[in-house]
Amino acid sequence: MENKNLINKHQVTKISWEKIQTEMKEKFGKDIFESWLRKISFVEEFNNYVLLSVSTRFIRDWITSRYLDQILQLVKSFKPEINRIELSLDENKQEIKNITNVKNINFSKDKDNVSFIKDFFFQYNRIDPNRNFDNFITGSSNKLAFEASKKVSENISHYNPLYIYGGVGMGKTHLLNSIGLKLKNKNKVMFISAERFMYQFVKSIKSNDMVKFKEYFRNADALLIDDIQFMNGKEAMQEEFFHTFNALLEKDSQIIVSADRPPNKLTRMQERIKSRFSGGLVIDIQQSDYELRHKIIKLKTDELRKYYSNQLNISEEIQKFLSIEIKSSIRELIGALNRIVSFSRIYNKTPNLSETKIVLKDLLNLSENRVTIDLIQSLVCKFYKISKTEMLSSRRSRYLVRPRQTAIYLTKILTSKSLPEIGRDFSNRDHTTVIHSIKTIENLKKNDPELCNNIDSLKNQILYNKSNEI
């Protein structure tokens, strides 16, 4: 199938919610899907976002806190243009009749020591059974954080507080989740994001329930707070957190905190809070090295093969390419692999290196404004050993026509230029000439393997020319 058709089809196709539901079931498992994700209804798709709905605020908050980012990645694997998901409440579906009556539900402490406050809006906990120490992949960049986390989970208040920081998508949340999962068997554990802590704090003030709020958080044996940097500038909340922090330390409860920066870099945070963070064990997760990224890609690829049997074959070349080029975060690395897998399943073929670079164009920072018509013309001329003057001339010799048509074809699929714009950059040729050139190359590619190889080689040079590297 022609690359132009691959790209254009991918851009115009409406997403299939049924297919995404199937992917969610495979990714999260049948139990989680049936309990939570099946409750999501598809409402409408817009240019760059999707509107979904659920029946209750509780379900919305639960899905938003635990699964929404991963659902967005699944949607983006079908249509990269989607950059956010709006999750609304469906007013036509019956809400829980009396929220105040939910406090009568019996949450058995014998079965699960992850505690809940009786009031409905406190029924929230982020611990995910699928994120544990066993499936956390270690390397030189995260080994220390991993070992400290295991130590804390085995000997409560050994390091107190434990402060883990690092960039986005480096595994901080995974480690906190693993600690909570291990501790909850014998301890009362609360794992919450700073944003959610703020939400509960504000809601408690409005509902005049601050006594319950204080009792709940100060009775935990282990308090894990993710993304503490979101407390920056929230003076009232910082005041409450400071007293909660002290109360927990006094009763030898464990406190584990994650952030995107070290304590001394937390802006608009009370000095006494930063001082207490610094008084514990502060560990950073550094940027992953090639060995760790390759280990992760290899493991994830092997896992995916189990799901898709022999239908999926990501070559070692592609695995190495992803490991070398996607450096920003582990989350982005796995997202890139998911795109390749989606490409393979949609088009029933494994992309070659050239197609991989097109699929991951935005992640590789090979934006279209870096791929210029002048660059395409220069590289095509060099490849066919002709001058640019000859290519742009009106001469119709065969040895000039094919390179000219190839350059026009590549300009169409690798840039967003319109047909008239392309014509102007090829010596003011008419747009009908541009259309003829594109169709000629598309037709020739069907029966000309050599031409296909030449175009793939040229795309590699254009998309990953040294001048385009970061």
Image (tube, grey):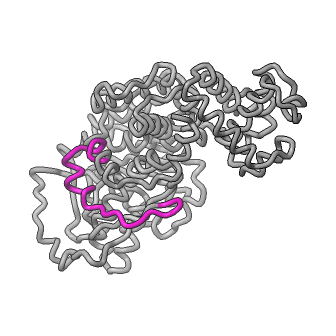
- Whether the magenta-drawn stretch holds residue 188 is answered as no
Is residue 250 among the parts visible in the rendering?
no
Q: Nearer the viewer, residue 149 or 75?
A: 75
The percent coordinates of residue 298 (x first, y second) are: 41, 24
Name which residue lies at 52% across and 38% down.
Answer: 329
Q: Is residue 182 left or right of residue 136?
A: left
Q: In what quadrant of the picture does the C terminus appear?
A: top right
Q: Nearer the viewer, residue 153 or 254?
A: 153
Is residue 462 among the parts visible in the rendering?
yes
Q: Quadrant of residue 62?
A: bottom left
User: How many dots with numbers?
Assistant: 0
Range covered by the magenta-colored residues: 24-49
Name which residue lies at 56% across and 56% down.
Answer: 271
Name which residue lies at 28% across and 47% down.
Answer: 22
Q: Is residue 269 left or right of residue 24?
A: right
The percent coordinates of residue 232 (x first, y second) are: 54, 60
The percent coordinates of residue 390 (x first, y second) are: 88, 28
Q: Quadrant of residue 347?
A: top left
- Whether the magenta-drawn stretch holds residue 25 is answered as yes
The percent coordinates of residue 388 (x first, y second) are: 86, 30
Instruction: Relative to 408, say whether 226 is above or below.
Output: below
Instruction: Relative to 40, say whether 77 is above or below.
Output: above
Q: Is residue 281 left or right of residue 368?
A: left
